Amino acid sequence: MSVDLSTTFTGIRFQNPFLLASAPPTESESNILRAFDSGWGGVVTKTIGMHPVINVAGPKTKFSRYDPASGLFSMRTKSTIVHSSWNWELISDKPLDDWLPRIRRIKAAHPDRALIASIMAGSGSDKELEHWRTMATACQEAGADGLELNLSCPHMDRPDMGSNIGRDEALCSFVTQVVKEVATVPVWAKLTPATADIVVEAGAVFRGGADAVTSSNTFPSLPIIDPNTLEFEIQVDGFVSSGGLGGPAILPLSMANMSRMTRAFPDRSFSAIGGVSDFGQALNYLLLGAGTVQVCTAAMLDKAVGPNVIRKLLEGYTEFMERHADRGWKSLDDFRGLLRNRVVAQSQIRRPDDSDYQGGYDEAAEGYAAPEITERAGARED
Ligand SMILES: Cc1cc2nc3c(=O)[nH]c(=O)nc-3n(C[C@H](O)[C@H](O)[C@H](O)COP(=O)(O)O)c2cc1C
């Protein structure tokens, strides 16, 4: 049985709803070409900017893993159980003029694959606002099918850039509006999870004219400290600054934000990111109402552009559609948002009947450690 995995999102046709997120996998022309050859439905380029970029003098990204044998949770263990990525990498260090011919060549080679250009500038002066316009115009003229505004980079010292825009309702609306005034292609706004209520900023960028919200960028965090060396596991000269957490650890956190937004704006478009490496994980976001799903950490760990990740996503999606063919599902739109309204206020969750209620903890352990293990752990020698 042949299954149609294609989808139209914000007016852009995608052969499948799975994209490489803006990050190292989409930092070069050769990576993006390999990504399309591997089957990704689209890519969001590594964020392009107008300012010179110099990264830290040390590792920019590391992966934390859990080793069940030793109980170690660390960036140093070789375990295959990935917990998260941690990075303090800045945006692309290639200038706009380097990117433009590359976007042209990629689109010439793959006219049927979607390329979204991620762009970022400041918001504190007319010159900065002009940077947004310059990049938007240049990228769309080079052939980009859409633009993603990076309003969410978590490690910017400048108060008028990155997640400092994304945290500010008025600024993120205004920057979106500035780009929309010159944009001839759809504009997505990538929001930061580091905010009190992401629904506020989502509403703001939609008011500014955004065609979609992308969520989530990485979560502000610190790398863990090695108890032996007493140093952060990623640092330069002993120093560290706030960076971003991605990968499996953020899937439930990013789901919560997606759910808040899709319930508040059920008719709007959302591109989901956070901790996805297979179809079951991507499905979380689709069932909450997202229309495309982006991947970063899992792809970085799989030959740099995730050929096995996209193969698994496509296999899982095909098998899912075949399994549900009897429900008449023919495309993503037939099941997208199916569980959106299942997230409700706590007070709306059914309580037990009076006769069943024990008035406190039940006798049976409710998924906690069994009592004898707890007692042994707390037992005293004397
Ligand atoms: C090393 C690294 C660099 C990144 N660079 C960018 C970037 O330039 N622009 C951007 O919008 N997001 C960037 N991100 C964030 C990712 O696009 C993505 O939002 C985040 O990693 C969560 O997805 P994941 O759980 O699949 O990793 C970067 C992430 C990593 C790990």
Image (tube, rainbow, N blue to C red):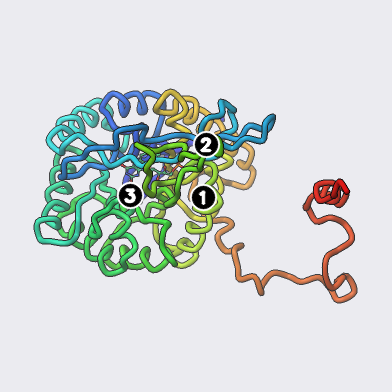
Q: Earlier in the sequence, mark 3 or mark 2?
A: 2
User: In this orientation, which residue lies closer to the viewer: 57 or 355?
Assistant: 57
User: In this orientation, which residue lies closer to the viewer: 88 or 354?
Assistant: 88
Using a 10 Å C-alpha cutoff, classify the residue at mark 3 as few (fewer than 14 neighbours), some (14 to 19) or many (20 or more).
many
Q: From the top left corner, tell me how far across and down residue 17 is, in percent.
A: 43, 41
| Identity of the residue drawn at 52% across and 30% down | 76
Amino acid type at circle 3 is His
Taking 103 as reference, is 68 left or right?
right
Taking 188 as reference, is 227 left or right?
right
Task: Tell me if residue 2 can be seen.
Answer: no
Taking 229 as reference, is 24 left or right?
left
SS at circle 1: helix
Q: Residue 155: which disc?
A: 3
Q: Residue 285: which disc?
A: 1
Q: Residue 64: which disc?
A: 2
Using a 10 Å C-alpha cutoff, classify the residue at mark 1 as few (fewer than 14 neighbours), some (14 to 19) or many (20 or more).
many
The image quadrant that residue 138 belongs to is top left
Q: Give the image quadrant in which the ligand numbered 1 is located.
A: top left
SS at circle 2: strand
The answer to whether 341 is drawn above or below residue 289 in the figure is below
Q: Earlier in the sequence, mark 1 or mark 2?
A: 2
Q: CA distance from mark 1 to mark 2?
A: 24 Å
The answer to whether 339 is drawn above or below residue 204 in the figure is above
Q: Earlier in the sequence, mark 1 or mark 3?
A: 3
Q: CA distance from mark 1 to mark 3?
A: 26 Å
Q: Nearer the viewer, mark 1 or mark 2?
A: 2
